[in-house]
Amino acid sequence: MSDLNNPHDKIFKQIEKDPMIARDLIQGLCPKNVVALLDLSTLKNDVNSYIDETLKEYYSDLAFDCESSVAGIVKVSILLEHKSYKPENEFLQLLRYMLNIWEFQSKNKEPLKPVIPIILYHGEKEWKTGRFKGKFPDLGPVLKRFLPDFSYIMADLSTYTEEQLQNQIFLNSANRLLTLLFKHFNDQDYLEDKAGELFTLIKDYINDSGKDIFISLFLYYTRIADGDAEQIAKKIEEISKEGGSIAMTAYNQILNKGIEEGIQKGIQQGVEKGIQQEKLQTAKNLQIKGIPLDVIHDVTGLSVTEIQNLK
């Protein structure tokens, strides 16, 4: 599933690539005993993705380097789950993901760093976690040491209440809105009724420095909601005239860009069609004059079959 075709993936990367916002998300979703060992003020983007062809159907990722009090620099990876349901063998997928990171570090002669995987899940059914060793029968104390037993952090948005996501877990308002939209992306009644209330959460982004995030969240909202973008913008305008104006301007720019690209595509298709018609007519004229097929092919670029089918 590519970034272009998955609006969840796209907005996730647009918002959480900012280390300041990602820091707030990690602090809100991770257990306190894990956060206590991390210096999240040192969080730094890793520009690489470690999702390979096998994994991209299931996840997208944002990886960060972070200093810890016990292990030096660790890798903190947020993986957005695509399928909206728990895969059968998430441990094998995560093991593959971590191996991709360690192979990259090894090839670049870097020290191997511990990986803390955080799965951000927004399916309707609860994702119950376990341990990798639970996939095997009881092996006893001698054999169990041969299992690559590890854990991961599960951020299942279905287990959080509205109050927790809106007011308690996050300090950053973009995280509040993003997680609420992820949680309710399939609930059209919720999205239709709550537009004004939800965008009240990010009033602090209605300024020059935050406008890009505001626009990104608005456009994501229009993708997942069936409502008319103009009506959504009007609801936003009720809480902020400037916000409604920014939203409508952004939507019109996208709309006009789409129209322009459609026109250009149509023009190009017309040109190509005209060239093809010209080639066919030239081939006809050469046929009438008894010019050999191979010569007509060389002149026009048409296939022998195309030339033979001319009437």
Image (cartoon, rainbow, N blue to C red):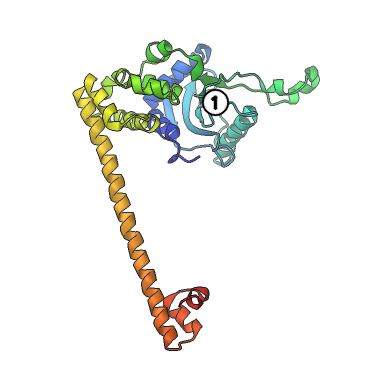
Residue nearer the viewer, 105 or 282: 282
Q: Quadrant of residue 40?
A: top left
Residue at 75%, 26% (x, y): give it: 146
Q: Which residue is mark 1?
A: 117
Q: Position of residue 2 (x, y in %)?
A: 48, 41
Q: Is residue 175 visible?
A: no
Residue nearer the viewer, 156 or 227: 227
Compared to 291, does 257 lie above or below? Answer: above
Q: SS at mark 1?
A: strand
Residue at 56%, 19% (x, y): give it: 126
Residue nearer the viewer, 114 or 32: 32
Q: Position of residue 303 (x, y in %)?
A: 50, 74
Q: Position of residue 222 (x, y in %)?
A: 35, 31
Residue at 26%, 40% (x, y): give it: 253
Compared to 131, does 65 lie above or below? Answer: below
Amino acid carrying mark 1 in the image = Pro
Residue at 52%, 32% (x, y): give it: 82
Q: Quadrant of residue 226?
A: top left
Residue nearer the viewer, 20 or 13: 13
Q: Which residue is at the far front? A: 311
80 left or right of 215 in image: right
Q: Which residue is at the far bottom? A: 290
Task: Point out the image quarter for the C terminus.
Answer: bottom left
Q: Position of residue 168 (x, y in %)?
A: 40, 11
Q: Is residue 309 visible?
A: yes
Q: Which residue is at the far left? A: 241
94 left or right of 69 in image: right
